[in-house]
Image (cartoon, helix red, strand yellow):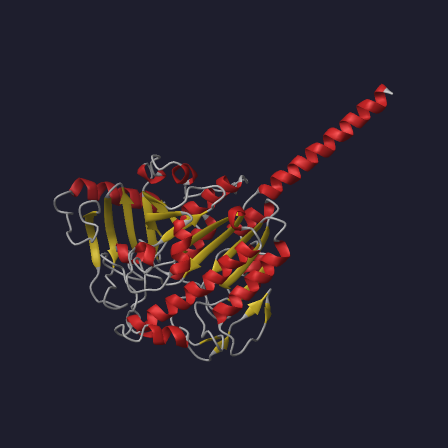
């Protein structure tokens, strides 16, 4: 009898333990990481824009935390995405510049790199990529090879939103894929297709934790806002009117995604991150502008603030403060360790360059981890690479361009030092007044290269 009771007690304890473990797993938050494409530093209502319509993204900020000193990992697409997904400097992650946009093109995130998707998948999460990839165009560098169980979107840098063709260089290439198989949805607006794919995934996985990388291709050119939004913004000057319509179309679709979370009663159980990959574009294909860096100099391709100092939001109504702001310095590489800590899962056992923001998100008095560690940016390799370093309030521009008025200025900015606390617009080069600081930051960059 006692033996039977002992066996029963052990069995009951085992069942309770398994039930508790299952409940703990169920309580792990879902995670949605949203990355906008070429959205400028000041291009959200909650970040100061007065002429844009972004109520749904602004509402996300009200339910979460705005990060006002947030930096992307790079001023251009592929390296920025590599830094976000791996938590490592893009150069360390093997993506110093843009990756292939067509089959046979050069550049990809190495298959050996461990992504957020692989981290969450190892913790029992369902994983999905929706939208833009631009981190490889081969089977072994595709989303499915990097931890995403489901993938839908385009592999290259941009597409027409209705034909889903890549038009950068001939021959024109159709670029729309679901789990490695080419699919055709001619005439359907790609942002709508993204929402539909996400909604179906949420319906399928609402009872288990999921990780979604929602990689927008908006407001990247071609500017293709809905007719209603083009009419709404008809009185704005060109090309701001085209850009504003596209941003409004983006926000409208994000509203549908958030509404799906509410319908599934998952909003309080879901961490949502929003950031832009780099500053607004001043390329010819973007009508030489439309976006805004606010007070900052620079835009896409530039390591001045307008290329890398960008809007960022994190919201988790069930686990983080709401309607707050953090002014501490933060970086896209920080998301991987931060989300691991918030979700209570193990980080990858590789060297990470990002640092967890969990402490300062919960407590506004906590310092930024970057008060101790310098921030590095580099695009390209070798002696002509663009690079910059920030430590504290000091930022050294080693080599970059001011793309505020166009994407191909002739003049290079070399070895210029800025005090961002006194001069956030990077208007006054103080390198001659502070040669020791220049030398210290140059040394940090040299060590970073090693």
Answer left or right for 149 relative to 362: right
Answer left or right for 391 relative to 157: left
In which quadrant of the rendered view does residue 232 lie? bottom left
In the picture, the quarter occupied by the N terminus is top right
Query: Which of 200/80 is in front?
Result: 200
Placement of 237 over or under 270, stated as above or below: below
Q: Which residue does the image show at 51% across and 47% down from the upper left?
A: 268
Spot the residue most to the right: 1
Placement of 5 over or under 448, stated as above or below: above
Q: Tell me if residue 429 can be seen.
A: yes
Q: Which residue does the image show at 36% across and 55% down from the upper left?
A: 74
Query: Which of 250/264 is in front?
Result: 264
Q: Which residue does the image show at 40% across and 75% down from the upper left?
A: 228
Spot the residue most to the top: 2
Answer left or right for 50 relative to 315: left
Q: Tell me if residue 134 can be seen.
A: no
**Residue 108 on image: x %, y %:** 47, 60
**Residue 297 on image: x %, y %:** 23, 58
In the picture, the quarter occupied by the C terminus is top left
């Amino acid at each position: 009898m006692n033996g039977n009771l002992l066996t029963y007690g052990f069995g009951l304890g085992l069942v309770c333990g398994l039930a508790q473990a299952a409940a703990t797993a169920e309580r792990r938050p879902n995670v949605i990481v949203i990355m906008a494409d070429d959205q400028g530093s000041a291009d959200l209502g909650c970040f100061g824009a007065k002429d844009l319509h972004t109520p749904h993204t602004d509402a996300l900020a009200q339910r979460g935390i705005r990060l006002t000193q947030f930096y992307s990992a790079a001023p251009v697409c592929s390296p920025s995405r590599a830094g976000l997904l791996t938590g490592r400097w893009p150069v360390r992650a093997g993506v110093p510049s843009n990756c292939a946009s067509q089959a046979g093109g050069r550049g990809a995130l190495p298959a050996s790199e461990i992504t957020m998707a692989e981290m969450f998948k190892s913790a029992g999460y369902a994983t999905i990529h929706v939208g833009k990839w631009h981190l490889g165009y081969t089977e072994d560098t595709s989303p499915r090879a990097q931890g995403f169980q489901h993938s839908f979107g385009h592999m290259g840098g941009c597409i027409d939103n209705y034909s889903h063709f890549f038009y950068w260089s001939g021959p024109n290439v159709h670029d729309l894929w679901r789990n490695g198989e080419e699919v055709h949805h001619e005439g359907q607006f790609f942002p709508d297709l993204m929402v539909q794919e996400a909604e179906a995934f949420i319906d399928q996985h609402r009872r288990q934790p999921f990780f979604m990388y929602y990689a927008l291709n908006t407001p990247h050119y071609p500017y293709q806002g809905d007719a209603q939004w083009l009419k709404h913004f008809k009185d704005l000057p060109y090309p701001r009117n085209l850009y504003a319509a596209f941003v409004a179309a983006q926000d409208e679709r994000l509203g549908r995604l958030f509404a799906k979370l509410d319908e599934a009663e998952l909003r309080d159980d879901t961490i949502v991150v929003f950031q832009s990959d780099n500053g607004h574009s001043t390329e010819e294909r973007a009508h030489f502008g439309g976006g805004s860096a606010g007070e900052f100099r620079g835009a896409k391709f530039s390591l001045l603030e307008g290329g890398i100092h960008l809007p960022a939001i994190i919201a988790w109504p069930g686990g983080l403060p709401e309607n707050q702001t953090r002014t501490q310095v933060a970086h896209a590489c920080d998301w991987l360790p931060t989300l691991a800590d918030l979700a209570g899962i193990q980080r990858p056992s590789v060297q990470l360059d990002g640092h967890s923001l969990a402490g300062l998100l919960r407590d506004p008095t906590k310092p930024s981890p970057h008060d101790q560690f310098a921030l590095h940016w580099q695009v390209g390799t070798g002696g002509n690479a663009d690079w910059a370093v920030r430590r504290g309030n000091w930022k050294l521009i080693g080599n970059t361009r001011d793309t505020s008025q166009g994407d191909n200025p002739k003049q290079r900015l070399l070895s210029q030092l800025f005090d961002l606390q006194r001069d956030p617009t990077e208007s006054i080069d103080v390198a001659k007044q502070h040669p020791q600081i220049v030398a210290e930051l140059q040394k940090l960059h040299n060590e970073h290269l090693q």
